[in-house]
Image (cartoon, coloured by chain):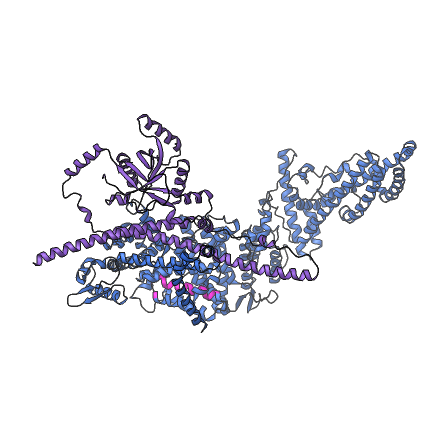
Amino acid sequence: MASRAGSARRAPENEATIQYVQCDGLAVMKIVKHCHEESCSNMEVAQGALLGLVVENRLEITNCFPFPKHDDTMDEEEYQLDMMRRLRRVNVDHFHVGWYQSADVGNFLSLSLLESQYHYQTSIEESVVVIYDTKKSARGFLTLKAYRLTPQAIAMYKEGDYTPEALRNLKIGYENLFIEVPIVIRNSPLTNIMISELTEMIPEEEGSKFLDLGTASVLEGQLRSLMERVDELNQEAIKFNRYQQLVVRQQQDKHRWMVKRAQENAARAAKDETPLPEEDVNKLFKPHPVPPRLNPMIVAGQIDTYSQHISQFCSQSLAKLYLTQALQNAKEAKQNN
Amino acid sequence: MSRFFATGTDSESESSSEDEPVVRAPAPVYTFSDDEEETKRVVRSMKEKRYEELEGIIHSIRNHRKIKDFSSALASFEELQKAYTRAAPVVQKEENGVAPRFFIRALVELDDWVVGAWNEREARKALSKGNSKALTSLRQKLRKYTKDFEAEISKFREDPDLPDDNERKDSSSSDESEDEEKPIKEKPKPEPLLRPPPEDDESSDSMDWASSSSDSSFSSDDEERGTSNIREQFIKKVTKKEDDEEKIKLKLKKREERRERSGKINKRDVADDGGEWETVRKGAATSDKPKMFAKDSDIDAALVVKKLGEISAARGRKRTDRRAQLELLHELRTVALQHNLGDALQLKLRSAIVAALFDYNPKVSDAMKPEYWSKLVENIDHMVTLLLAHEDMVLSETILEENEQLVTPPYQVRGCLLTYLERLDDEFTKLLKECDPHSNEYVERLKDEVRVSALIDRVCQVVERDGTPQEICRAYLRKIDHLYYKFDPRAVRKDLPPTEETTIKKMERYCKYIYAHDETDRLRTRAILSHIYHHALHDNWFQARDLLLMSHLQETVQHSDPSTQILYNRTMANLGLCAFRRGNVKEAHGCLAELMMTGKPKELLAQGLLPQRQHERSKEQEKIEKQRQMPFHMHINLELLECVYLVSAMLIEIPYMAAHEFDARRRMISKTFYQNLRASERQALVGPPESMREHAVAAARAMRRGDWRACLNYIVNEKMNAKVWDLMVGADNVRAMLGRLIREESLRTYLFTYAHVYASLSLRSLADMFELPRQRVHSLVSKMIINEELLASLDDPSECAILHRSEPTRMQALALQLADKVGNLVDSNERIFEKQGSFFQRGGAQRGEGRQRERPREGWNRRTRNRRRDDERADD
């Protein structure tokens, strides 16, 4: 457990204030507990606040507490403040440094996540969102990832304009909405000692079930989700396509109208009359609203995560299969001999 | 209300509905010479109008007088003159040319005033110029004008304190005339018994009084002349003009009524101490037998016909008392019978009575009373008996009144038996619909069905004898209408002697006649539908199906009238049931799908109205829809229908679902079934099934698992037997068929679902598993192999199906599906790129096109090339 989880696939591109997130074992355990409880009882997402400190170039997360379930009778903000106040009394870091959320095989990317993180990051500069993947962790891979919005994403959200042009000007795409911050789990030396002792107490057969070959069901589920997303993206593409057709048709109409008006004006000029104004064209042809590109972008991001997961899973599975094949061959060879 | 039902008897219903709001029913006045009464009424209203006009002017003159405005008074006076000339004809008619008292009074008052003003010289001088001028001219004009009324004015001046008669606004004209004629002081004495006091007339129902009071005043003249014995006087008068029988009768009637009423009034007056009275009961007059003819007149056929003409002339009038008319007709018939005037006349009178009976019901939409209906049946029955008894008697619409032959054979009578019959039948249906189908009353009513059927049979005989082919068709269709929905147990018996005529044979005979001779398509359509229905009812699936396919009704039926469409729906429902009983599940599903898909088979079969959510139906619409409803004994059991539909949908859909589990473009066969199944699957906890629908769904789920035994248990158990299967003819056969089908389809489902986990399947064990004969399993598996539903080959010696593993695994299927979808996505993305002038394009140009455009271009180019090739091909 006391190992680094979540490899930093992508190095932070910009000069971020935070180089990595250091998470205390206690906070991690609390997150895991909360998320599992929540996802088992009902299929809702679990969310909570992270508490900690910024030290030099790292963000230390030392404690956390869950958000209550949505309840109208309770003021969530007040609850959070109360909670922090009480934690301070027991001498816990009370600096709000972000929030966490449970996820199911990387389906965390959504509009609401974007929104919340935007608000967090605009009010607390250093805040991160920690995503804990329940499903994957249940299979034995602890998946804890910290994300931050890129400056472009913040700018995009601030403008609230999701036209293709605006997005292009910001040079933003699904791949640079979020930036992953490496996460490090740190335990106190005492804990480390205890864990080391505990590992020795575990019987040898236990914990050797990593060679599970039942790949089909996991892959199937992921494929299905991926298909859904692809369908959705396709719908979006069709929507945009329709919009393009409309624009093209309108352009043609506009052009025709302009030509006609020019002819008329020429005729009028010949008769020494005042030319008709050309500005009417804007009144006649109102530009169609551009379909916002935010949703397709998010869907694309989701597809990207799914694909990554699938490819990762497949390579692991393949490796396992090759491994077992080799073992099997060796066994057969032994028997033959 | 009822005017929305524009049927033949529109006028009556309309008039009667207008009568309704009046609190009191019109007094039973036997006024057959209506014209007299009617003109009088018109004049009265004229009179009122004129008099009101006069009064208005007089009133304004009075006002002008008060403020001494001579010029306005002059104008008003001129107006008054004009108004009076306008009213003159009325006055002439009503009061024998004597000016009404209030008018005279106004003149006198005006005159006094003008003279007074004229005499006051000082005051006159003080008047403005216009006013004094007006005064002068008014005086002159008034003088000239009053000369015409000198006599009246002088009479008025004798005692000016008498009340103005016109204050009793619509009281009888006689008042006024009497006022003028006689010394007034005498007047009140003979009156109070006869006439209501003035206040009463002002009351709300004074309109009603209009007619009767005019009657009373009419006779009161006589009374005054010789009050001692009114009746004698009248009879004397009658004898004077004996030739005009009609008049006499009328008078007699009036007399009687008068006597009745005055007697009543007398009684009332004693009780009320001469106080007010307001009602004259309707029934009072009808207690007397109406008199038909003068005592000693010679009654012969012509006279009776004439009388009949008189009576029926009043038909449909607003004030005609329908019951009295009926009684008159009955009386007339008895008279005719007494004098032995021949059967043809009897027939004619009967037909008149039938018509009157139909009229008796004021609203077309409501059912008539059962007792009247049975009278109808009796009468029509008598008519048929008469017609059947006389070979040479013809009753037809085509015979005109003038050409009737009532006395000498060959008799010819105008009338249409068939129409009567049709209406009788319709009324019967209405009667049935009126009463609660679960009550004994309904059963009682339904017993009359036998009568109606018998009557139709007899009418058919008559029509066959002397009707046109079209009429025969109509009669036969009625016959068919009473036949087609009845199940004849003899028809399904195998050991039937060929001579016995079952209903099927009868239907065949009637329908064939209609097919051959009908000229309107409607009758033929209905006949065909009924025929199909009847066949379907008796499990003659092939005949029924062939008839339906031959008729090509499926394409055209939506253009027909609603009742035919309802019949079509009923036929289809029964055809579906028939197909199911015969084990043709697919056909059963096909027949029923259209009905059940909409979710409102109840309405489609006209077996009840469903509440509509989107928009309320208006009253008329509801009435129309109610009229279309089927009587209860003809209903088709909806639960049975739905169950059959669901079970057949299950037998088709479940194997299909199993076969096409990974097909992206899978279409569901039955939406309703699918929805039910989905709803059940979504439930977290599924309890044991209660309703029929739950049973069907539970069975479907069991079948999906390949658990045929559970499936069969859900479909065939005690509950379902009681609810559904026992209602079918040959319930045991149906159950056996169901068992077989469920096993077969479960086997197919099993093979579809689990074939991929087997390397080979032993047919023998399959047969054991599904308790099917081995040959059957063999044929099923072979069929699936042939249809490429199962990729396997049969190994005969070992009786095994050896499966070829060539179909993709689940994972592969999913991957393929994903590939499809990604392909679609790429397509639509490329289309976005293709569009010139898009945002991406322009941006690409700015940023040096390179990275964004380069890559997709190759694929895109290839595609456009292909497309171009396609275009060229298309051009070729």
Q: Give the position of the C terminus of chain B as an image quadrant.
A: bottom left
Front in this rendered view, residue B108 or B307: B108
Point out residue A324 in the picture as x, y percentages from the top left corner. Answer: 17, 53
Give the answer, above or below, for where A285 lies relative to B222.
Answer: below
Towards the viewer: A285 or B145? A285
Q: What x and y, as percent, mark residue B163?
A: 76, 36
Does A304 sit left or right of B382 as displayed? left
Q: Is residue B654 left or right of residue B481?
A: left
Instruction: Look at the picture and state if B796 lies above or below B430.
Output: below
Q: From this view, report whether residue B348 is shown above or below residue A201.
A: below
Q: Is residue B677 visible?
A: no
The x, y position of residue B206, in whole percent, is 66, 42
Q: Colour of chain A?
A: purple
Whether B539 is among the magenta residues is yes
Which residue is at the front of the view, B130 or B839?
A: B839
Q: Position of residue B565 (x, y in %)?
A: 45, 60
Furthest residue in direction bottom, as rendered: B876
Chain letter matching colour blue = B
Question: In the rendered structure, which segment of residues is drawn in magenta?
Answer: B522-541
Q: Is residue A142 visible?
A: yes
Residue A330 in the figure: left or right of residue B678: left
Residue A85 picture quarter: top left
